[in-house]
Image (tube, rainbow, N blue to C red):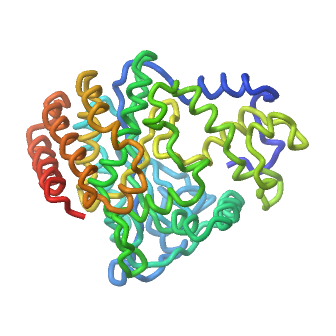
Amino acid sequence: MVTSPELDRGAILREYEAAARHLARICFKTGPPTHTGMELEWTVHDAADPARRVDRARLRAALGRHSPVLLDEASPAHPLRQGSVVSLEPGGQLEISTPPHTSIGALVRATEADIAQVSGLLRRAGLTLGGSGIDPYRKPHPLLETPRYQAMRRAFDRRGRAGRTMMYCTAGLQICLDAGESEQVPLRWAVAHAVGPPLLALFATADRHAGRPTGWASSRMGAWLAIDPSRAGPVWSPARPDDDPVSAWTRYVLAAPLLCLRTAGSDWTPPRDVTFADWLAGALPRPPTTDDLDYHVSTLFPPVRPRGYLELRYLDAQPGRDWAIPLAVLAALFADPETLHAAYLVSAPVGHRWQDAARAGLADRALAAVAARLLDLALAALPRLDLPSDLNEEIHRGVRRRRAAAERGDR
């Protein structure tokens, strides 16, 4: 993390067009869509008393040489055996980020191994991973304090308590898919968004927080949607289905207010309501650099974020091994152009209903019906993933179980 302006690198940016070219180059890397990766988050709990707070020292001792540098400055931060990198969110939520794989079966097996390894490290310290998208036991409480996190909290506090809930209590499942060849990007971008509300409803696991029912199927996503629509709302909309992804993302990035302004000191709070476009136009004493733009992008949290690949950020953490089910469903929906196009036609009519999906889940009959139809498409396309027979059977059982829930309209 850059903490001093002397460490800034990159070309100086003075024009909108130069910033747009940089974003197009780094955020949409085109090529054959062959790779898939994952980022899995969990809340971390005392195994005997899950409502007890877990402090830094205990986590540091548990993770040892795999501790992220934010937790232990002297840590070598070694990856897990299968290459996943361990990181922590500001409330102490643990995250592993896998390397990309060309085989879904290989990705599942490698992820299982790394989850088993990190679970074993925690278990020896009397700790365990949570199984839902929001902490069901504890109220928001910071574990990590950095200038970035302090600036984020100040900005989000202006809109209420949702920012603290998001920062300190939520856990998501992120699926990372290649953007595809240039001519494929618009459809892949649109489908990544359009299937979001029905899949959010289908895989919602965040209905209890701090010991109480929340009234939401995914209070995790409810918190994200409440923090700031200019940086956490969706980029694509069914109202503008033909919007060029690069142009839409560029507008979104440059119109978003600065969340952090890195300085040599500990206060990174930016002037209020200054956007990156304002900075380009001379609103701050020095011009921004490409590094500043990259850092600004890292403070934007839409449901789908382009990072060279497409990062689908809208799913709740899943209990146990169930994370493999949404992974396989999304991989199957993106497996071939025909399935991708069919998924778009099915989901586009509800592709704007993020709030309804977070609040009602499968109790919303329209979302449940679309979720069931998407699962039918996924079941038909699963053979294209070439999964090992045992994993294929397990995934099929999980998908059929979720389809039955969609048919019942389970919350």
The residue under the point 62% across, 28% down is: 23
Residue 175 in the image, given as x and y percentages of width and height? 37, 42
Instruction: Tell me: residue 273, above or below residue 139.
Output: above
Is 119 or 372 nearer to us in this picture? Answer: 372
Left or right: 352 with respect to 335?
right
- Left or right: 285 in relation to 343: right
Q: Residue furthest right?
A: 285
Classify residue 407 as left or right of residue 319.
Answer: left
- The x and y percentages for residue 119 are 33, 63
Kindly tell me whether residue 83 is visible in this rendering: no
Q: Is any atom of residue 221 visible in this view?
A: yes
Q: Nearer the viewer, residue 128 or 222?
A: 222
Q: Does 285 sit left or right of 189 as displayed?
A: right
At a point 26% along the width and 33% down the height, the residue shown is 333
Q: Residue shown at 44%/24% (left/top)? A: 186
At horizontal 25% and vertical 48% (from top left) the residue drawn is 324
Above or below: residue 336 compared with residue 38: above
